[in-house]
Amino acid sequence: MKTKNKINIFAIVCATVLGIYALCMFVFAYLTVSTSLKDIFDLNVNPIGLPSIVCFENYAFAYETLVVQVGSSGNARLIYFDTMLLYSVLYSVGCSFVLAVVPCIMAYLTAKYNVWLNKFIYGSVIFAMVFPIVGAGASEMFLMKRLGLYNSILGTWVQSASYLGTYFLVYYGSFKSLSNEYMEAAIIDGASHMKVLLSIVIPLVKTTIFAVFILQFIAHWNNYQTPLLYLPDYPTAAVGLFRSAYSPNQAGTLTENMRMAGCVILCIPILIIFLLFKDIFMGNITVGGIKG
Amino acid sequence: MKKRMKYEKDETFFDKIKKPVSDFFYDLSTKLPRKKKKNTSLKGRRTGELVFYYCLAFLPILHFLIFYVYVNLNSVILAFQEYKFINGEGKFIFSTLQIETVWNNLVYGNEIKELLSHSLIFYAFSLCVITPTALFFSYYIYKKYKFSEFFRVMLFVPTIISSLVVAFMYKFFIDRGVVEICRLFGKEIMPPLSDPSQSFTYILIYILLVSFGGNVIMYSSAMTRIPISVVEYAQIDGVGPVKEFFSMTLPLIYPTLSTFIIVGITGIFTNQANLYALYSDSAPENARTFGYHMFVLLKKVSSSDMSGYPYIAALGVFATIVVVPLTFFVKWVLDKIDPNVQY
């Protein structure tokens, strides 16, 4: 709703503060990009000004130099940035896929089937959200090692395959508002339950599933702490950037201009996804319907 | 004699044998076993439903039982264990040593108390500064004042960029940019994030910058769900923007606000205040939070070192014992002051 709002003190103060905030973001972005385009001498002499010579080769150099050493001293190997990007893609896509699909299926079963287990499933989601349990990280790591899921990308997919969380409730609300007529008509015509799920239900909520997938992909792409803990031998790009900054014994320690170039490279896929799917991020998640 | 029509032909040899042959094969088909009909009875359909349901639900429920129920129970069990080498083999044995260590540290020592005090300061800052500020600016976005769409995008961008990247940008801006700007004005200062006397303030500013955007987006989304008719009635009655905010908007988004406050209680013990991105393992002692300390301990536990798990589990048990009643108490208080407005 856009109203013709009169200019008032409240609006002026808010606009000023938000303007300062936006300016801070622009300054951060400017410093990052300008630093990434400077050579090391220019950076030491002129840390905040524009680059005197624009060095685009910093990006290529950062791409080649960002190296992480993994494994113990007798079994050490070097992981280069392109491999880290591959690990990032595998980790992000796999975890996002399970986090988008598993809550969807469980929410569908809970919303559309009359089984005594529904109360348990729904209750477990609410319990996990309301009842705060802190500090189970040690136990989880212990379990992952015992199950052989530690230090494995497949292990992180299994670890992520939980239906708990707010997305279950989002899907649940969507399925509850969906008419049963679609499914009943298909079953009367002889479709199996799996066919109904795959051919009718999933297409109806595919926008929601895709939105959840995109949001989870971004979260996992940016996440450096979970791969740092559970994937010591499969560093993602974010982990590589972190270790290049804070591990002085790494095979490739980056200077500040290279690190900023690495930051820009890490942000590019996210910014592309944001520009392509801006409506998903800024809009609402809704449910579709069948025509006719 | 009946006149023969033009289309009637004389019977050929094949016409004569066609009927007996088709009768023969029909008789044969009646003797063959038939395809089973689908059991369309109610009981059969219900069985099919249940088989489908349990097949799909089995793995996620197994995952829940293992990765939630067992992990949390095991966390409590680990807290009452100690890793010892017996006959050259490492084993977990029952011991209250870790619980006693945490208790002694809490009562007689300073480490846990300092961690808790820093965590509480960060939480209070979030509750008393960031939340009210975010509410005001959410209202600005919701009312679609000038440049609200632009500000909405600017507020959203830091939430999608990696916290590590934002930390590096901020660190460079503060430790190089601010130092250089001061130098241009003739003042030499130490990089603020490395200066123990100033680092806490700059960390608070950093938290404000990164948390602010996400909060504004959440609250403005909640405000958009307020029916337009309710707002228009108020405007017809001459309600100004400030009165509308306090008397209408806040009560109507109270459920969202209270949910965030309740979830924030757990954050007292889990919030790292982005310290790991800014400092890795070497955050200044006067800024370390409980969540940061737990993460650093967890990181240090190596693949071959099992001995560190019980202490971390004991810290987690202590935190859970404190945060659970606190969460329910805060929920009770918030329910008491709930204006209970519906639309």
Image: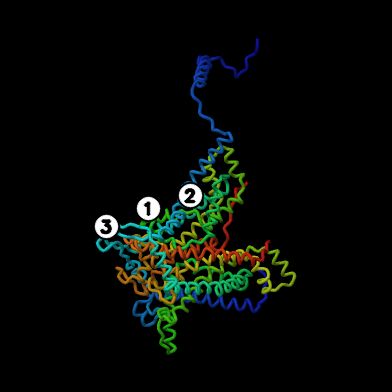
Give, as a three-letter code, the residue at label 1. Leu
Mark carried by residue B61: 2
Task: Examine the rendered structure and indicate whether residue A265 appears above or below residue B12.
Answer: below
- Assess disc 3: are there few (<14), some (14-19) or many (≥20) residues with their C-alpha within 10 Å of its C-alpha: few
Mark carried by residue B87: none
- Assess disc 1: are there few (<14), some (14-19) or many (≥20) residues with their C-alpha within 10 Å of its C-alpha: few
Q: In the image, what residue occupies the spot 26% across and 60% down?
A: A75
Q: CA distance from mark 1 to mark 2?
A: 17 Å
Disc 2 is placed on an element classified as: helix
Mark carried by residue B88: 3
Quadrant position of the N terminus of chain B in the picture: top right
In this orientation, which residue lies closer to the viewer: A240 or B200?
B200
Q: How is the image coloured?
A: rainbow
Residue sitting at the far left: A74
**Is any atom of residue A188 visible in this view?**
yes
Label 2: chain letter: B
CB within 8 Å, label 2 to label 3: no
Q: Which residue is mark 1?
A: A147
Where residue B63 appears, x then y in whole percent? Answer: 45, 51
Left or right: where does residue B48 sit relative to residue B110?
Answer: right
Give, as a three-letter code, the residue at label 2. Ile
State whether discs 1 and 3 lie on one chain. Answer: no
Residue sitting at the far right: B237
Give, as a three-letter code, the residue at label 3. Gly
Which quadrant holds residue B335? bottom right
Disc 1 is placed on an element classified as: loop
- Assess disc 2: are there few (<14), some (14-19) or many (≥20) residues with their C-alpha within 10 Å of its C-alpha: some
Label 3: chain letter: B
